[in-house]
Amino acid sequence: MNNTLKERLDYEATFDCVQCGYCLPVCPTYIAFEKEKHSPRGRINLVKMAAEGKISVEDMSEGIDLCLGCRACETVCPTHVRYGDMLMSAVEVIKEDKKMNLREKLVRNVAFKRILPKKGVIRKLNYALYYYEKSGVKNIVNNKQLLGKDKKFAELNLALPSVKKTKKISNVKNTKNNQENMKVAFFQGCIMDTFFSKINELAIKIMETHGVEVHQVPSQTCCGALQHHAGETQDTIELAKKNIAAYSDENVDYIVNTIGGCGASLKEYDKLFKKGSYWHQRALKFVEKVRDISEIMDKLTLEFNREIPYQAVYQPSCHLENVQKVFDAPKDILENVPGLQMLNMEGQSLCCGSAGIYNIIHFDESMKILDHKMKHVQDAKPNLIITSNPGCHMQMQLGVEREGLSKHVKVKHIVEVVAEACEIRC
């Protein structure tokens, strides 16, 4: 049993950690909770002890469950420990070991199989949110404090963005004015498509305006990030296969997305398959084309037409930096936006506490991490927070609302900032 558990928990990789502690200052949960089991080093020890049979899987889960999965530890690790791989193996083992009640099984089935992978359902959810706001019900819920007894959902309701109706994907290839001689296929994403479809539209317009040929891919599906983080590996593999197949016929240079978290998932599709296998080879070809929108915009000669008079801080997506290793492109773009003053913020790269659905499942812990982040925001005194991921966007908006800053501080995606400076609208 233990040998099998050692294989399932990526046991050999735990010995790569030399316990140096370089990861501690960049780990949001260690900073917030000040316990060794909530640090990367501590979690690796928990995995090792569980694999050796010294503690139970349930004991291991106490530290693993509260990990944000931000993977900042990987960026600073001097021995290049594959923490993300160990974390995913532990999450999968915990999920398989845990006896879920009927409610948990139902929620997982509905969310991971009936909603996220279904574009039609996502579109209906988008319409429901659109009418929830436009009908005035959202304001009534906020003003009458109808969710007052449930602090979590009352606060999350405040963070909901203004939603635009999502347009149905059509198999369009815009070939006009292809000055840059660049062809890209666009990946929409589920949460982005539901809550922030306007940002996707603006991203496409920015590219097309600057001569990029943009292909839409109707057969695309959910990236599988949330499923993978929940230990639903087989579901993730099936979604990966569908996306790899959907984009394989597109003769393009890049596969572009506006979502730091989804992009990271797409970038690691090759890890889902056995090395050398048919799907591993296809995944490698797919992965090498995946790019964040900031990487594409950084390649373009952006035509800025107006000044943007903001004092801003940039809150990078953890997975954009720590998984995709995109550090410079967003900062280079923002530094060149006319009128935009970028401010230094302490702890800029620390996770905001969103982490997929972490802020729903572990609300109190997430808010403690967010409060720490907002202290740094307030010290920097910006009037704009710039993001690169929908979860981060909503979490930072929630932070602004919680601190009573909504009249003075806006939250925008980097695409919105560039579009505003280029006078591009949708």
Image (cartoon, grey):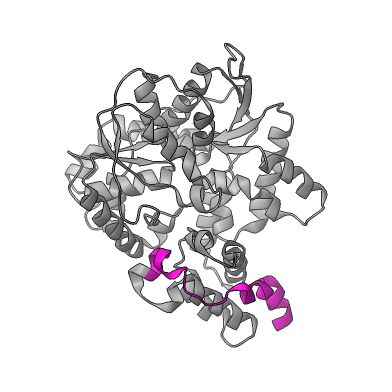
Query: Can I make out residue 150 in this image?
Result: no
- Taking the image as shown, residue 261 lies to the left or right of residue 27, namely right
Q: Which of the 4 image quadrants contains residue 417?
A: top left
Q: Position of residue 259 (x, y in %)?
A: 49, 41
Q: Is residue 26 magenta?
A: yes
Between 423 and 132, the one lying in front of the other is 423
Q: Is residue 230 above or below residue 393?
A: below
Q: Residue furthest top?
A: 176
- Where does the magenta region start and end? 2-30
Quarter occupied by the C terminus? top left
Query: Can I make out residue 53 in this image?
Result: yes
Q: What residue is shown at x 67% (from left), y 46% (from top)?
A: 240
Q: Position of residue 316 (x, y in %)?
A: 41, 47
Q: What residue is shown at x 56% (from left), y 85% (from top)?
A: 55
- Taking the image as shown, residue 177 lies to the left or right of residue 417, namely right
Quarter occupied by the N terminus? bottom right
Q: Is residue 387 above or below residue 71?
A: above
Between 112 and 406, the one lying in front of the other is 406
Q: Is residue 316 above or below residue 372?
A: above
Main SS of residues in magenta: helix
Q: Position of residue 291 (x, y in %)?
A: 58, 38
Number of labelled discs? 0
Q: Is residue 322 magenta?
A: no
Q: Position of residue 388 (x, y in %)?
A: 43, 41
